Amino acid sequence: MTNDVIVYEVSNAVATIRLNRPDVLNALNHALMQSLYQAVSRADQDESVRAVILTGTGRAFSAGADLTARGDSATSQDSGKTLRECYHPVIERMRAMPKPIVSAVNGLAAGAGMSIALAGDIILAASSSYFLQAFSKIGLVPDAGSTYFLPRYVGEVRARAMAILADRVSAAEAQQFGMVWKVLPDAELIPEAQRMAAHLASMPTRAYALIKQTLNKSLDNDLSAQLEFEAQCQSIASKTEDFREGVAAFREKRPPRFQGR
Ligand code: T3D
């Protein structure tokens, strides 16, 4: 699937979704958000897909909401409505997606573009990329999950400073803060994302789905509730073909051949 604003490709069990409005730094308009939702849903439903890469075309991952898509008067649209209709379904679908998502942040990630990057499971960043909570610079509030992800990833002090000051955070700082798993030289970002996604696609996909579920609940549950949820997920994982294969491979001293079932 390729349309103007999203490129969607599947190769060797990996779906690559690319935000594709490079002239405006992949700013997010209604068409792009709708196509992004469709692409994420498609990767979710396609049984042949076992890992996803999310990235952008050109020098940006995304500059956030398209500020030119609002007509003459910026205040004529209700942003809360736009968020509920266009952004929340994407963020929730990404977090619920039963397959790992690698955010390959190829360039700047600003506003809701940063929120989308943070909704991935493994966040890789090109060394020249940067992150920007651009919202307060234009009189808005961090949205699309930024106030959920950031305090959890980087802690209250840094989350508040990022949201209020809206300073650029370099890829190196983002890694030091704990927002990013690895920073790579620009030319190595996509090859490394592809290597990682190919590896993830060869691993026990159902266990990954359950890992995502347990971690999604972790910071909202108390210990007893989380222990119980882990036990429920382990109960499911321990009945999968992949668990049987993992143990058999260990006993036979050979590499496992996981089928994602
Ligand atoms: O109602 C709702 O939609 C609610 C949802 C809100 C969520 C949000 O994301 S709010 C935050 C929106 N984003 C921003 O405020 C960031 C705006 N952009 C910038 O501040 C700067 O562009 C950057 C700091 C990100 C990058 O600066 P720079 O100097 O590298 O690039 P540039 O020259 O500013 O941008 C290049 C082009 O992209 C330029 O177009 P031109 O002049 O070449 O024709 C610029 O207008 C365009 N562009 C950049 N960001 C956006 C954009 N066009 C539309 N919307 C953008 N967000």
Image (tube, helix red, strand yellow):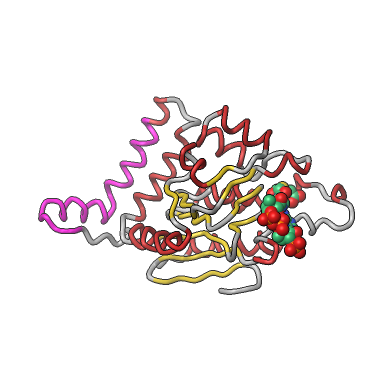
Q: How many marks?
A: 0
Task: Locate residue 98, reporting x and y percent.
Answer: 44, 53
In which quadrant of the rendered view does residue 86 lie? bottom right
Q: What secondary structure predominates along the stretch shown in magenta?
A: helix
Give left or right: position of 203 versus 172: left
Above/below status of 172 relative to 3: above
**Quadrant of the rendered image holding ligand 1:** bottom right
Q: Residue at x 75, y 44 (%)?
A: 80
Task: Locate residue 21, reporting x and y percent.
Answer: 66, 66
Above/below status of 171 relative to 46: above
Residue 47 magenta-drawn? no
Task: Locate residue 123, reporting x and y percent.
Answer: 47, 49
Outermost residue, bottom direction?
2
Q: What are the residue bounds of the magenta stretch?
A: 227-255
Q: Residue at x 18, y 58 (%)?
A: 255
Give left or right: position of 133 versus 227: right
Residue 29, visible in the rendered structure: no
Question: Where is the C terminus found, in terms of image quarters?
Answer: bottom left
Q: Residue at x 55, y 39 (%)?
A: 149
Give left or right: position of 182 versus 148: left
Q: Residue at x 66, y 60 (%)?
A: 25
Task: Locate residue 36, reporting x and y percent.
Answer: 60, 61
In which quadrant of the rendered view does residue 99 lie? bottom left
Question: Where is the N terminus found, in terms of image quarters?
Answer: bottom right
Above/below status of 113 relative to 22: above
Residue 238 magenta-drawn? yes
Q: Between 166 and 241, which is closer to the camera in this rendering?
A: 166
Q: Between 116 and 34, which is closer to the camera in this rendering?
A: 116
Residue 9, visible in the rendered structure: yes
